[in-house]
Image (tube, rainbow, N blue to C red):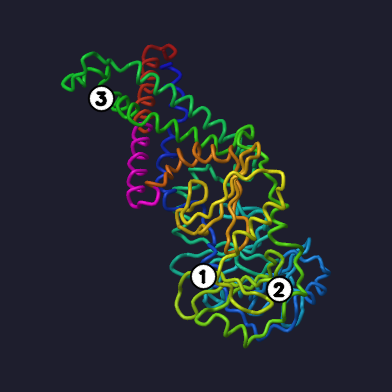
Amino acid sequence: MILSHRYLGLALGLLFVVWFASGIGMIYARGMPSLTEELRLERLEPLDLESVRMMPMEAAERAGLGDSLVSVTLLMVMDRPAYRLDGGSAATVFADTGELMPELGPVRAREVAGRFMDVAPERVRYERLLTRADQWTVAERRQLPLHKLSVDDERRTQLYVSPEAGEVTLLTTRASRALAWISAIPHWLYFTPLRVRQTLWTNTILFTAGLGCVLAILGITLGILQFRFSRPFQWSRIRSYIPYTGWMRWHHITGLAFGVLALTWVFSGLLSMEPLGWASGPGLSTEELGRALIGGPLEASAFPPIDGDTWNALLPGRSIKEITYRRILGEPYFMVRSTPAEQVGRSSTDLVAAKTLGVREDPFAVDALMARIRETYPDVPILEARLLEEYDSHHYSRDQQAPLPILRIKFADPDGTWLYIDPRSGQLSTSVHYLDRIERWIYHGFHSLDFGFWYYNRPFWDIGVIVLSLGGLATSAIGLFVGTRKLWRGRRSAFRAGGPPP
């Protein structure tokens, strides 16, 4: 056991040190650099509604999509109003002339980036057209190709522009890139040559985390077996209970204090990869429910033409950035996303009834939502239907952005499915079955320590996680140092004796 623990520690000790140290950075980085939805809407130009000259159906015909529209969004693209259309294939059609948007070349990409950053095009340097993922586009590689550009500003901003969508899809800065290098990249082993090979990356995580569990179990077992406890317990003799001196004593002490924590963290990290698909379960199919909540296919002809004067007076004090055409419970609605007209602030989402052009203030009736649910699952008993005013353990977010109130429905199906439906949007928010709930506690509970009584009490949660991470870091670093020194001394002794190391 001692030899196994020692040599596994030598092989994985540095990785444990990196995991604990980068875990502290993950508290604040939360992942790889990205373009947040708030920043995207903030930088999006206000809709020029008076320039809209055509209806979505006309735009769909221009794009060759016919009447098979699934989604329609009106926004500004390259300083012009445009429809983003999805009807089996995607297309962007300018709403002022009906012209199909061509793919962006380097010159237009510079213009888009300069407009997004509000700088002159001369301050935007075109880098190259990415056809293969780099370090920052690993998660966005399905959107490739992307134009990469750099901005001459204090933050050393880099932008990625989609030739097909004509908009910025990713933004990184010198600070966000540096933070990623000390947090998400080493923590998730998100190195590009490894990450782009999905199977190799998955197997690497599973293999190293599995050996890490063995290493932690051996360390905990040895720490307990070698603790020379005697009765009655006496604090004055505590030093004699540990049979080591120097750094090895500190490795024993920190291992006893933080070994179980190290095991739960590495084990929960292992389970996050869902080895053998252990948390996969069917649950109730939500596709039919989604269609029921929508109430039928999107009928763009049911929406009135955009009248600039009417719309500009609809949300006073707000700057309309995006209008999405939606059908909810069989009725047509505009989902309007806007930001404060003057100052920078949080975006908001409003539903506007297409028939009356009135802003919907009230959420959809729970009875109407429940009727759709019962129609979708007529043979599945409902154990509980409750409108939650506060987050529970499965519908929550640290930044408080998950919608509230939320309708939670518990079913008596074999998989113990729970559905969460947002009454304000009339849409399904999430679905979890019993294996999802087990995974939530084994992974997020043990890995993020996101227990409600603690998770929302910052900075106490930060302090607690940092202290625990430093404890795990200490026992890993000391163990690596002790093991390396032992190995080095053994090699030196063998060299002097002229024989193989013991």
Q: Which residue is mark 3?
A: 246
97 above or below 268? below
Query: How far separated are the C-alphas under marks 2 and 1?
Result: 21 Å
Q: Nearer the viewer, mark 2 or mark 1?
A: 1
Q: Which mark is residue 347?
A: 1
To which residue does mark 2 refer?
83
Of labels 2 and 1, earlier in sequence is 2
The C terminus lies in quadrant: top left
State the count of labels: 3
Residue situated furthest bottom in the rendering:
309
Instruction: Rate crowding at label 1 as few (under 14), some (14 to 19) or many (20 or more) other CA atoms within 10 Å.
Output: some
Give the magenta-colored segment's residue range.
455-476
List x then y, in percent, for residue 182: 44, 48
- Residue 351, position as x, y percentages in the image: 60, 71
**Residue type at tag 2:** Tyr
Left-right relation of 298 to 452: right
Query: In this image, 476 relative to 199: left or right?
Result: left
